[in-house]
Amino acid sequence: MRRFIPFLKKPPLVPVIRLQGQIAASGRGLNDAGLAPLIEKAFRAKPAAVALVINSPGGSPAQSSLIAGRIRRLAEEKGIPVHAFVEDVAASGGYWLACAADDIWVDASSIVGSIGVISAGFGFTGLMEQHGIERRIHTAGRSKSFADPFRPQTEEDVARIRALLTPLHDTFIAHVKARRGARLTEGADLFNADIWIGARAVELGLADGVAHLKPKLQALYGDKVRLLPLSPKRGLLARFGLAAADTALSTLEERALWARYGL
C-alpha cells in the first residue's frame, strides 16, 4: 500500500546489473548492443545508485570500452553513483568494466587485474608438411595474408601484431588511471597483466575494500534499501537448448578464458 500513499518516503532503490561471462560482440557474450537496454533501464529507474555485479575473465577491448563508456556517460549525466562488486573474477576486460564504477568491492578470494592485451592463435605448417598438404593462397594487397596460420610466422607478422596490441594496452592503462587516479599505489608495476587476490588488490589500489553486495549497500543506503536485479535475457532458441553452432564455439572460447584463472 505504501506506493499509493504519495507522502510516504520510498526506500532507496539500487538496480543491480549482472555482468557475467566473456565480453564479445557475437555469441552469448556480454556486449554493448545486448546490455544497452538493461543499463538504460537501470538509470531511468530514479535510483539512489546502480550496482554492477562482475564475474568476467575479459574479452573484446572494444566491447569493454563501449559498455564502460555507456555506464559512465549515464552516471555523469544523471549524477548517480555506481558501485562494482567482484565475484570470482574481474580480469582484463572484466576489470575494464569494474573501473566504470566509482568504487570497486571484492571478495577475499576474488581475482582482479590482468591489465594487458593478448593475441593468440595456432600454426599448422609442420602438420601440413607432415601430411603433404600444400597451401595455395592469392591476394591483392600484401597484408591480406597477414598472420596466416598455414604459413610460417615471420618477424614482420610479430612486429605488426605488437603494433596492434600496444595502442590497445595504452588505452586500457589510460582508462584505469583515469578512473582509479591517486588510489593506485605509486611505483607499483600494475600494468604488466599480473593478477592479484582480494586484499592484495585493495592494497595496490585496484579495489576499495573487501565487501559483499547486500551488506555494503545496506551500510551505504540503509537497511531498507531495495535491490532490483537486472540480467540479460537469453534468446528463445537458447532457452530451449537450440543455440546455434557459433554459440557452441563461443562457449569453448569462454571456457578457455575461465581456465586461465583456474575456474
Image (cartoon, rainbow, N blue to C red):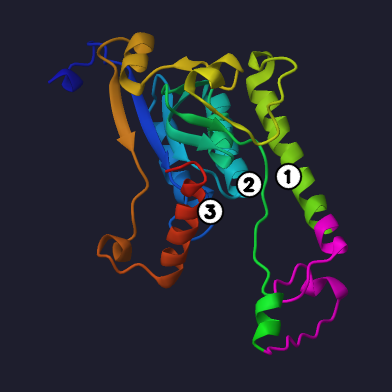
Q: CA distance from mark 3 to mark 2?
A: 9 Å
Q: Which mark is residue 168?
A: 1
**Is residue 206 found left or right of 57 in the rendered image?**
right
Q: Which residues are magenta?
A: 132-159
Question: Residue at (49%, 54%) from the top-left corner?
Answer: 256
Q: Is residue 45 above or below residue 205?
A: below
Q: Which mark is residue 24?
A: 3
Q: Which residue is mark 2?
A: 61
Q: Amino acid at mark 2?
A: Pro
Question: Could you tell me residue 122's position as x and y percent?
Answer: 65, 66
Q: Is residue 63 above or below residue 127?
A: above
Tell whether label 2 touches label 1 (CB within 8 Å). yes
Q: Earlier in the sequence, mark 1 or mark 2?
A: 2
**Is residue 254 found left or right of 147 in the rendered image?**
left
Q: Earlier in the sequence, mark 1 or mark 3?
A: 3
Q: Which mark is residue 199?
A: none
Q: CA distance from mark 1 to mark 3?
A: 16 Å
